[in-house]
Structures are given as structure tokens and as C-alpha cells.
Image (spheres, rainbow, N blue to C red):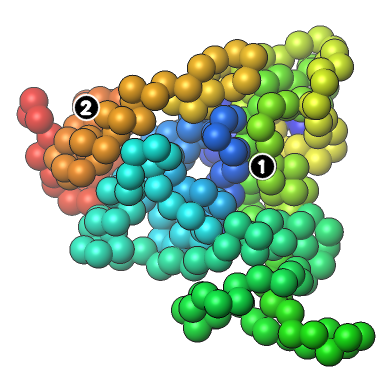
């Protein structure tokens, strides 16, 4: 049954250095506040999984939290590249990061397999790409019934899945609606799940097109209004397009990035200690 916890307590209880975590949400309901709390707590050597890593994983990679990224597409939607991700891959800053690349369909099949308790997913896919040669977790198998060549991909079973949703009730049942991705499958595939929500209500009322995750599949519910910002939560907030555009210039420059992390996530008073704790060393931040 889900516990109602603060976000800091939920992350402290469930995320360890070296954990495998998934953070899902498609266009909206992206759990940015949860990612910021992971940065704030200085978690390291994480294997981070997301179908479409965007700004939140750019921030976590730049902050030194991630050792490996499994994904199917990476970019700042509508703007361009993920600059901190690019710097880690190309220049090893703040350290080298391992990447495991799949297609959207392959990632979805992996989550479904994990949620179903199966060891792998099967699909017709990857034909005509070089991903089979580049990614060791993509295998070609022969259908035992038809002899057709198919693609097998291993199940994803994160230690912790994070999602954001519109609301939960006081018993920990979670309701979300609007554009949905693989949040349900990612939660069901995980050993533990943490859901940040816009509000906690006494009782969930029906919403057209909504899904409900029962409390018994959720480990913790955290009330974090605007916890998806700068993405949005349908019915509660709007996408902050200006910030997505501004992020490109911030992320391109290491010092500007560190200044932003210092001011908006860690706090300038604690930033030098944070840099030491996550292996970034003594870094100069504007204003010191």
C-alpha cells in the first residue's frame, strides 16, 4: 500500500547510489521535481532509464548523478540537443556515461515485458538500422511457430520508477489523464514506485480518458504541486516554453549550468560541499 510521504523522505527511503531508476511521462507529467530531489540528495552511479530523456536527465547527467542512460530518443523538445548529455558522451564531463539505445517500440516492449513478469519482449523492429550491432541488448530470434525472424529485447525492471500525476486520494490511489506514455507499465515493472501529484483529495472522481493506479502498486505518493514544471500537468498547469528555450544556452556552458544548479536546486551555501560529494571537485560558481 502506498505511503503518503514528503518527496525528500520518499527519495531517501527508496533510492540508493547505483540504483536503476525510470522517470516516465510523455510531453506532460514529467517528474522534474523528483529528479531535482535526487540531485539534491547527491545520488551517484545511477542507471537512468527514460524513453525520451529530455531536460530532467540533462540536469541529472550534468550534476554527476548518472553512470548509464538507457533511452530511445534524447533531445530538448522543440529546441535541439541535450547539451549536458552531449558533453558527457563526447568529453567525459563531469564523467563518462554509458549509453544503451533502443527504438520507442523496443523500449515500450521492454516495459511491457517487465510489467508482465516476462524475461523479454518480442517485436518486429530494428530492421534496417545499425542498433542491433551497436546495442548488445537487442537480439534476433526465430519464431518457433512460423520461422519468422523477430527481435527480442530484455525486460526493464527498475529499482524505482518515478512518475507525476494529477492527483491521488488519501489512500494512495493515483489518477492521471491527458497524453499518456508508458507510466502505467513503468510503475508495474518496478520494484518500487514514487508518484508526485498536484494534489491529494478525499475521493477520486471519474475523468474521461483517465487511468487509476491502485495504491497497492505504488510505494509512495508525494504531494508536489507544479512538480512537472517546466513541463505541464493537463488541467493544472501549462508548459513553460520559455524555459525550454532558455535551457539550451544555460546547458551549453558548464559554468552557467553549475550556477543554475547551485541557485535553483542545491543552494549556493551548500554547493561546494555538493561538488565534493559527487566527485565534481572544487568548481567556481559565479558570485563566489
Residue situated in front as seen by the camera: 152 or 223: 152
Under circle 2, the secondary element is helix
Q: Which residue is rendered at x = 85% and y = 33% of the image?
A: 214
Q: Residue furthest right?
A: 145
Image side of residue 210 versus residue 29, left or right: right
**Is residue 137 visible in the rendered structure shown here?**
no
Q: Residue at x 59, y 22 (%)?
A: 233
From the viewer's side, name the closer residue of 247 and 18.
Answer: 247
**Cβ atoms under marks 2 and 1 closer than 8 Å:** no
Residue denoted by label 2: 268
Front-most of 62 and 131? 131
Measured in 3D between alpha carbons, the distance from the residue under mark 2 to the one under mark 1, in whole angstroms, is 36 Å
Whether 266 is drawn above or below 89: the answer is above
Give the residue at x 48% y 55%.
Answer: 73
Asked if 101 appears above or below 276 in the picture, the reply is below
Q: What mark, if any, has residue 197 been given in the picture? A: none
What residue sits right under mark 1 in the picture?
181
The x and y percentages for residue 112 are 76, 57
Report x, y in % for residue 149: 74, 85
Q: Residue 207 falls in which quadrant of the image?
A: top right
Badge 2 or badge 1: first in the primary sequence? 1
User: How dense is the environment of label 1, judged by Cα within 10 Å: few (below 14), some, or many (20 and up)?
Assistant: some
Question: What SS does tag 1 mark?
Answer: loop
Report the residue at 72% width, 72% height from top.
124
* In the image: residue 263, left or right of residue 201: left
Amino acid at each position: 500500500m502506498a505511503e503518503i510521504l514528503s518527496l525528500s523522505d520518499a527519495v531517501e527511503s527508496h533510492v540508493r547510489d547505483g540504483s536503476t531508476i525510470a522517470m516516465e511521462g510523455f510531453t506532460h507529467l514529467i517528474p522534474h521535481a523528483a529528479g531535482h530531489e535526487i540531485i539534491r540528495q547527491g545520488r551517484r552511479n545511477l542507471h537512468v532509464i527514460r524513453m525520451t530523456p529530455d531536460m530532467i536527465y540533462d540536469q541529472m547527467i550534468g550534476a554527476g548523478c548518472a553512470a548509464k542512460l538507457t533511452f530511445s530518443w534524447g533531445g530538448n523538445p522543440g529546441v535541439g540537443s541535450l547539451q549536458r548529455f552531449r558533453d558527457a558522451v563526447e568529453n567525459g564531463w563531469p564523467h563518462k556515461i554509458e549509453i544503451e539505445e533502443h527504438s520507442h517500440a523496443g523500449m515500450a516492449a521492454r516495459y511491457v515485458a517487465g510489467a508482465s513478469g516476462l524475461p523479454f519482449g518480442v517485436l518486429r523492429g530494428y530492421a534496417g538500422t545499425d542498433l542491433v550491432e551497436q546495442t548488445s541488448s537487442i537480439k534476433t530470434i526465430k519464431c518457433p511457430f512460423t520461422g519468422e525472424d523477430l527481435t527480442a529485447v530484455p525486460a526493464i525492471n527498475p529499482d524505482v520508477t518515478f512518475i507525476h500525476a494529477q492527483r491521488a486520494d488519501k489512500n494512495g490511489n493515483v489518477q492521471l489523464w491527458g497524453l499518456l506514455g508508458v507510466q502505467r507499465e513503468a510503475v508495474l515493472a518496478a520494484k518500487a514506485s514514487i508518484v508526485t501529484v498536484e494534489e491529494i483529495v478525499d475521493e477520486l472522481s471519474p475523468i474521461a480518458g483517465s487511468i487509476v493506479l491502485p495504491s497497492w502498486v505504488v510505494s509512495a505518493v508525494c504531494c508536489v504541486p507544479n512538480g512537472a514544471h517546466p513541463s505541464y500537468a493537463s488541467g493544472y498547469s501549462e508548459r513553460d516554453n520559455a524555459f525550454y528555450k532558455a535551457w539550451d544556452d544555460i546547458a551549453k556552458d558548464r559554468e552557467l549550468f553549475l550556477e543554475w544548479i547551485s541557485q535553483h536546486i542545491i543552494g549556493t551555501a551548500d554547493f561546494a560541499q555538493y561538488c565534493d560529494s559527487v566527485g565534481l571537485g572544487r568548481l567556481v560558481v559565479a558570485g563566489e
